[in-house]
């Protein structure tokens, strides 16, 4: 987003934004800075905003072959209409929230390219402050836009009758085709460390805490040296988070119980044992550092887990109990054990996984399984740094590629029906607020075939 000073906007709508200067002979010089593409409420879109959006898309590797200047301008106008109305409706975002998002982006960029200097060079910025200011404006507009869009659709639901009507109004030869899908169940054993090993880890974390508190040792350095969290170790254990950040409950509960500058006692999560240091509190946002230590699991515990899974598998094959009963009674995975071991798709929380969209790691675990077959024990390492787990798996059901069936594919059809209802609600909202909002499109852009009635014709 570009920055400019604009006075008398009504007189400048058809013209370029210009900087007016006077030389020693009092002659007036106009220096062209940028052109106005459109005005939406309180927001001005410059020609450079459109060009920069195209450049950003290309830098992200997106295909821009079918993207036109008119379509990009239309999207920027939509975003600004959402943001403008969000302000009118008092759907505000705090500066702390926006700054925290900008900080996360900067951290990610620095980790990708290696230094802040390289980031500034890539984005052609002379200093960190100007870069932060630009990120702030971009993120504030985006967050306002998202908040408005969420408000428009958040209470929309579809009834079973609406789903039925949606499906049967689609001509039979035009109904969607769903790809091959699997239903997968698993029984998990999580080997654990001995109590002595756990206490050794707790004692080590207490020593680190004492060294920081009593001897002014650097928590940052300690995290780099000792933490076993791959996501934050290189950053000195740093995370910025709110209560909505997807961290495990135990971690968030401890983090939000601490004061600025305080270090927690050691506590346990599924990943291991942690201590947290609160670096800064900004409203509902926390800047923290943490150290994760994972107790070493002895080979004997791993061997016992594999042996138990082998035994469970054989009992199922012998008909002693069903896979679902075994999951309920023996699995250590609380998320699946009460559901017969059935895995839930994180996309829609249904039980089916479409083969073309499956996580590659999960696909590799089941790709050679025949229907009804139970795998041998498999080891699964936690990519987030937690201890490994072992499991046996089974394909409960297989659905070949097929044309949509109302009974078999109800959840997918329900999702499509809801999406259509949301799209209609957004379109109605857009039409209504275009009429009610001050909008001006520069003469040079009035030939665009916009998807929305920006020209109010």
Image (tube, grey):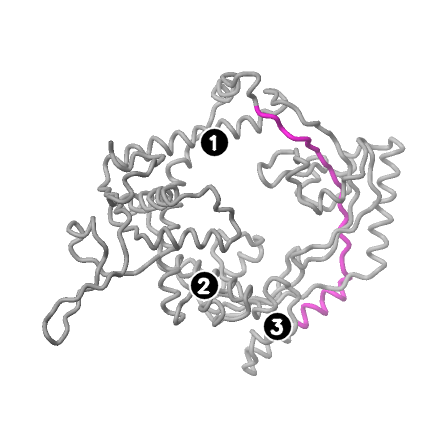
How packed mark 1 is, by other alpha carbons closer than 10 Å (few <14, some 14-19, many 20 or more), is some
User: What residue sits right under mark 1 in the picture?
Assistant: 419
User: What residue sits right under mark 3 in the picture?
Assistant: 224
Name above or below for residue 176 compared with residue 134: above
Identity of the residue drawn at 70% across and 45% down? 333
User: Is 245 within the magenta?
Assistant: no
Task: Kindly state the secondary structure of the residue where label 2 is placed.
Answer: helix
The disc, 3 or 1, on the residue closer to the chain's N-terminal end is 3
Tell which residue pokes out farthest to the left in this image. 26
The disc, 1 or 2, on the residue closer to the chain's N-terminal end is 2
Name above or below for residue 168 compared with residue 368: above
Q: Nearer the viewer, residue 302 or 179?
A: 179
User: What residue sits right under mark 2 in the picture?
Assistant: 103
Identity of the residue drawn at 18% across and 52% down? 12
Residue 389 pos. (x, y %)? 75, 52
Question: What is the magenta range?
Answer: 176-204
């Amino acid at each position: 987003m570009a920055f400019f000073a604009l006075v008398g906007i009504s007189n400048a709508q058809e013209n370029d934004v210009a900087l007016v200067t006077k030389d020693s002979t009092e002659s007036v010089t106009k220096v062209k800075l940028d052109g106005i593409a459109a005005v939406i409420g309180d927001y001005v879109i410059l020609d450079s905003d459109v060009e920069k959006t195209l450049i950003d898309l290309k830098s992200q590797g997106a295909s821009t072959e079918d993207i036109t200047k008119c379509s990009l301008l239309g999207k920027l106008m939509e975003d600004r209409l959402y943001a403008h109305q969000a302000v009118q409706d008092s759907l505000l975002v705090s500066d702390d929230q926006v700054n925290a998002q900008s900080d996360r982006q900067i951290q990610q960029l620095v980790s990708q390219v290696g230094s802040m200097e390289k980031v500034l060079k890539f984005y052609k910025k002379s200093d960190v402050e100007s870069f932060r200011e630009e990120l702030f404006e971009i993120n504030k507009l985006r967050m306002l836009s998202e908040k408005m869009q969420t408000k428009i659709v958040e209470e929309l639901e579809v009834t079973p009758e609406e789903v039925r009507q949606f499906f049967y109004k689609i001509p039979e030869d035009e109904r969607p085709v769903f790809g091959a899908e699997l239903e997968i169940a698993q029984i998990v054993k999580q080997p654990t460390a001995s109590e002595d090993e756990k206490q050794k880890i707790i004692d080590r974390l207490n020593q680190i805490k004492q060294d920081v508190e009593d001897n002014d040792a650097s928590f940052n350095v300690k995290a780099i040296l000792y933490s076993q969290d791959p996501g934050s170790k290189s950053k000195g254990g740093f995370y910025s988070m709110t209560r909505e950040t997807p961290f495990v409950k135990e971690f968030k509960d401890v983090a939000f119980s601490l004061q600025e500058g305080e270090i927690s006692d050691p506590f346990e999560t599924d990943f291991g044992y942690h201590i947290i240091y609160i670096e800064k509190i900004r409203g509902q946002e926390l800047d923290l550092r943490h150290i994760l230590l994972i107790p070493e699991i002895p080979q004997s515990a791993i061997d016992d887990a594999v042996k138990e899974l082998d035994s469970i598998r054989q009992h199922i094959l012998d008909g002693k109990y069903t896979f679902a009963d075994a999951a309920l009674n023996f699995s250590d995975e609380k998320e699946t054990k009460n559901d017969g071991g059935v895995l839930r798709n994180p996309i829609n929380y249904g039980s089916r996984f479409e083969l073309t969209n499956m996580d590659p790691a999960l696909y590799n675990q089941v790709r050679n399984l025949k229907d009804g077959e139970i795998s041998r024990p498999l080891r699964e390492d936690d990519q987030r740094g937690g201890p490994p787990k072992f499991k046996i798996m089974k394909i409960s059901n297989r659905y070949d590629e097929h044309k949509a069936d109302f009974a078999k594919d109800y959840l997918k059809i329900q999702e499509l029906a809801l999406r259509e209802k949301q799209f209609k609600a957004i379109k109605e909202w857009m039409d209504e607020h275009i009429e009610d909002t001050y909008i001006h499109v520069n003469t040079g852009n009035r030939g665009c075939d916009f998807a929305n009635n920006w020209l109010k014709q």
